[in-house]
């Protein structure tokens, strides 16, 4: 019997605060969870710097990945009970759900911004490379690892399988909204997931929703909208991300210029040099990064040490709201910062947040958005915003917010008679 069909002698369960229990009966799923590459996700926070805003947001990508697997498993179980599912795709779908985030790096998106990495590419590299995960997947079939990578890369031939973990309403989004709401303590991200499951129907190459469940789908979309603006784009979190990004930029610049670190960043060397291997990448997690932030507080470079102290001790930048016309930092403000002895490259940053809560594909557009379709009583499909006044009101409407971050404490500490202080305060309206 191949591993594809091998079952555990008894079901394993993980106690979970969101789904109550994560159920595992397949030997392959259990073994994948035990790999070094998957266990590394325990050391990667799901929400990056959000723990500095919401102190409960310490949860990991390990828990989220288990949750996405569990939602996918539950959806497949419902489909199978209605004879709406090809069982040959079950193990593939559950593996892809479990492994969809295995390539995330420490402080995921800030890290990617500085070093030009892509977590989806690393996810596929882990699945296809010389790893424990690859060796397990390969035992199913020689081309099974490629199939899993294709599902995650959204190129797999069966679009229905892809849509389970990558669409406008999928297992990934459902888990992170509920999980992030739970751990941040907010009430915004809750919606009736079980109701959504009950009205889901596989149709050709996508999942559609019965008209009778439209209000549950509306609730999900509004939950997503509120979570983005109240949690994911929170200005304190964004301030921490700005400082984190500046630390990584500064450390990279110092390393490349030959700076003699007291605490040489050996695990980061190949990253700074642009020759990082997959194994180098897998050795990085947030405990490694936080160790260097801790010790770099004592470095001789005043900018690096100050930024690290700010991050470690949560002495973050303040911000002023700016308009779209002010996205380029005023030269007068930069000059005033330089005169005050504050380097604008590291202490002035425009940060923009943007989200479109729901949209659908329009011919000629580059970015394909799979619309959410409602199954009408007559069997026809109607795109969601045609039937929902609530969703119709926000469809295609992108909200964007711009803020200028700066170290208010450094400005206020300048001498009162300082010309630079006066000019900065006037330009920033403080």
Image (tube, rainbow, N blue to C red):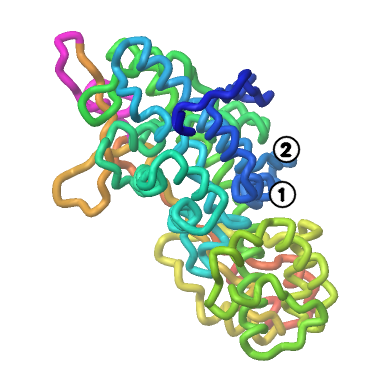
Write down the quadrant of residue 79 in the picture.
top left
| Label 1 sits on residue | 52
Placement of 73 over or under 408, stated as above or below: above
What quarter of the picture does the C terminus occupy? bottom right
Residue at figure coordinates x 65%, y 63% from the top left: 244
Residue at figure coordinates x 69%, y 70% from the top left: 267
Q: How many numbered discs?
A: 2
Q: Nearer the viewer, residue 363 or 279?
A: 279
Q: In the structure shown, which secondary structural element does the residue marked by tag 2 occupy?
A: loop
Q: Position of residue 124 (x, y in %)?
A: 44, 53
Q: In the structure shown, which secondary structural element does the residue marked by tag 1 occupy?
A: helix
Q: Position of residue 147 (x, y in %)?
A: 35, 44
Side of 319 where 395 appears, left or right: left
Residue at figure coordinates x 35%, y 36% from the top left: 167
Q: Which mark is residue 56?
A: 2
Q: Which residues are magenta?
A: 377-394
Placement of 417 over or under 220, stated as above or below: below
Q: Position of residue 183 (x, y in %)?
A: 67, 33
In magenta stretch: residue 347: no
Q: Nearer the viewer, residue 330 or 221?
A: 221
Residue at figure coordinates x 51%, y 49% from the top left: 135
Furthest-front residue in view? 1
């Amino acid at each position: 019997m191949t591993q594809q069909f091998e079952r555990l002698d008894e079901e394993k369960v993980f106690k979970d605060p969101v789904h109550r229990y994560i159920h595992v009966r397949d030997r392959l799923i259990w073994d994948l969870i035990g790999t070094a590459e998957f266990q590394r996700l325990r050391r990667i926070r799901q929400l990056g710097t959000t723990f500095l805003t919401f102190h409960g947001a310490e949860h990991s990508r390990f828990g989220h990945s288990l949750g996405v697997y569990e939602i996918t498993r539950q959806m497949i179980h419902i489909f199978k009970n209605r004879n709406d599912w090809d069982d040959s795709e079950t193990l593939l779908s559950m593996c892809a759900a479990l492994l969809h985030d295995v390539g995330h790096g420490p402080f995921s998106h800030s890290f990617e911004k500085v070093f030009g990495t892509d977590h989806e590419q690393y996810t596929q590299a882990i699945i296809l490379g010389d790893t424990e995960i690859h060796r397990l997947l390969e035992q199913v079939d020689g081309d099974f690892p490629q199939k899993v990578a294709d599902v995650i890369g959204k190129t797999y031939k069966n679009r229905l399988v892809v849509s389970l973990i990558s669409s406008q309403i999928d297992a990934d989004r459902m888990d992170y909204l509920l999980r992030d709401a739970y751990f941040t303590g907010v009430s915004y991200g809750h919606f009736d997931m079980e109701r959504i499951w009950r009205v889901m129907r596989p149709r050709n190459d996508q999942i559609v929703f019965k008209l009778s469940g439209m209000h549950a789908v509306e609730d999900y979309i509004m939950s997503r909208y509120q979570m983005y603006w109240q949690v994911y784009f929170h200005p304190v979190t964004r301030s921490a991300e700005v400082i984190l990004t500046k630390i990584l930029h500064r450390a990279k610049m110092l390393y490349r210029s030959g700076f003699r670190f007291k605490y040489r960043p050996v695990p980061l060397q190949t990253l700074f040099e642009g020759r990082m291997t997959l194994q180098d990448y897998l050795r990085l997690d947030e405990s490694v990064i936080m160790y260097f932030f801790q010790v770099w507080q004592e470095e001789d470079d005043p900018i690096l040490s100050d930024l690290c102290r700010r991050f470690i001790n949560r002495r973050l930048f303040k911000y002023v709201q700016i308009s779209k016309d002010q996205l380029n930092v005023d030269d007068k403000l930069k000059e005033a910062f330089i005169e005050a002895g504050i380097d604008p490259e590291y202490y002035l940053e425009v940060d923009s947040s943007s989200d479109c809560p729901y949209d659908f594909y329009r011919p000629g557009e580059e970015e394909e958005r799979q619309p959410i379709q409602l199954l009408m009583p007559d069997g026809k499909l109607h795109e969601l915003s045609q039937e929902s006044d609530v969703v119709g009101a926000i469809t295609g409407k992108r909200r964007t917010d711009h803020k200028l971050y700066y170290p208010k404490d450094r400005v206020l500490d300048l001498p009162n008679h300082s010309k630079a202080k006066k000019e900065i305060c006037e330009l920033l309206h403080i």
